[in-house]
Amino acid sequence: RVYDGELGERDMMDSGTASAYVVVEDCDPARAFDVHVLEEAQAKQQRKELSVALLQKRIDWQGLHDVMTVHVASHLIQEKDEAAKVLTIVTVLLHGGSPSIFLPRSRAATIEQLLVAAEKIVAMYLSTWSAERARRDPDSSHYFPVGKPWVSPFRGQTAPAAPAGDQVLANTILRMRDIMLHYEFHSAVADGHIGRAMNVMAVWTFTFCGCGKSKYTNELLELACNFEYEYSDELKQAVLNNWLCNLTGHKGRWFPMDLMMEHNINLLKRMSGQRNTPFGAQFFKEVISLNIRYFLDVKESLRTAAGIGGKPGRHKKKKKAVALQHLGRTMREHELHRFRANHIYGFTAADDFATRHARFASTSRIADFVNRTMFNASNLHNRDESAMEVEED
């Protein structure tokens, strides 16, 4: 706690432990949380069977394709209904221009036409296969919209090796693919759809490892072992049905339960620092902690009751109309979403998913994780792992 100069106090570290009672739903707690069942499953040491093939099998690619199609279609609908507004996500992010290259000239597109257009955008701009095709295939002009012939700006300089295809377009596609995965994860969580969120995490098992995020990779490998080999059906159901919570009852307001705990603990810390009372005092245990959710909401409730405009519970969205228009013009000027043979600016984006897929198959990373965690879950993170990642790179 920060010291109070008026009282002659000094800074001090105020520590404590906060816990929460949670009523789990849609499961059988007695069977789901039977420790003996979990210990028996772990004793079988089935996690030794963990492999790249199994991690790959956990990804529902068709499900990802379908849900991304729905996301893109929703943006196309926004563009159609709000044509007078500034560029939407799809016009800026997906092809830097107008949806007219995908939609019929008549703006009165049917839902079927929108879905067809969305599928074309997903196939063309949101897949690893398209990125590789753009980079490697010099004859991709029949697949992508074609831009002006590329004239290298590196005259008189040491020019980077030109790709057979279009490296800039490949970079752009990989960026959009990763952005849409992130967008889908947040959408799935907000919708309370833990299955979709876990599908994205199955992809991120490879991606995080490819970009050197070893702690996230270990957590996701542990999650895969738990669900594939060690959790009973009842425990799986309990975890999946209670991972997310919604304290409002409104659609789109779901969030992870561990985030709820972070909010609770953050307020406990602030309230402890504002009072001359230690974190573990009786008053905190019997009054404050038991009503922490109400304290979080009380200010907003009072504002509403008094007719005072409520303070938004999220960061205010910046007004970026001019910046988005400038971005759209720049993207069209450089034709980032059109195929231009030998197009390169000297930067090659790394495909973290493909990188780690290859490394999983060619290194002992999975075997090291299994051996480290077989008998001791506290060995989830290897102290030397960061150094190992640097050496691999």
Image: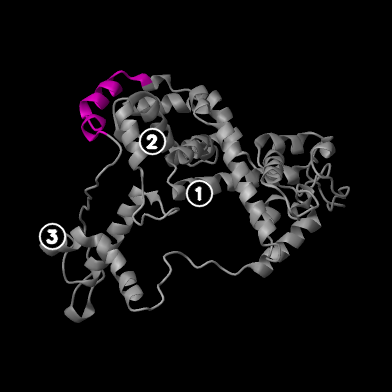
Q: Secondary structure at mark 2?
A: loop
Q: Position of residue 189 (x, y in %)?
A: 45, 47
Residues drawn in magenta: 28-46
Query: Label 3 neighbourhood size at 10 Å, few (<14), some (14-19), many (20+)?
Result: few
Which residue position is annotated with label 3? 286
Above or below residue 24? Residue 28 is above
Q: Position of residue 266 (x, y in %)?
A: 30, 60
Which residue position is annotated with label 2? 382
The amino acid beneath tag 3 is: Glu
Of residues 348 and 237, the one nearer the viewer is 237
Circle nearer the viewer, 1 or 2: 1
User: Which quadrant of the view contains residue 324?
Assistant: bottom right
Above or below residue 261? Residue 311 is below
Q: Which residue is drawn at the image coordinates 27% and 42% (left, top)? A: 24
Residue located farthest toward the bottom when viewing the structure as drawn? 6
Is most of the magenta stretch helix, strand or loop?
helix
**Circle number at residue 187:** 1
Q: Quadrant of the N terminus?
A: bottom left
Of residues 15 and 309, the one nearer the viewer is 309
Q: Secondary structure at mark 1?
A: helix
- Whether pointer 2 and pointer 3 mark residues with C-beta atoms closer than 8 Å, the reply is no
Question: Is residue 29 one of those drawn in magenta?
Answer: yes
Camera sees residue 246: yes
Q: Quadrant of the C terminus?
A: top right
Q: Position of residue 166 (x, y in %)?
A: 78, 42
The amino acid beneath tag 2 is: Asn
Q: Work out whether mark 2 precedes mark 3 in sequence or the reverse, and give the earlier one.
A: 3
Above or below residue 54? Residue 243 is below
Camera sees residue 355: no
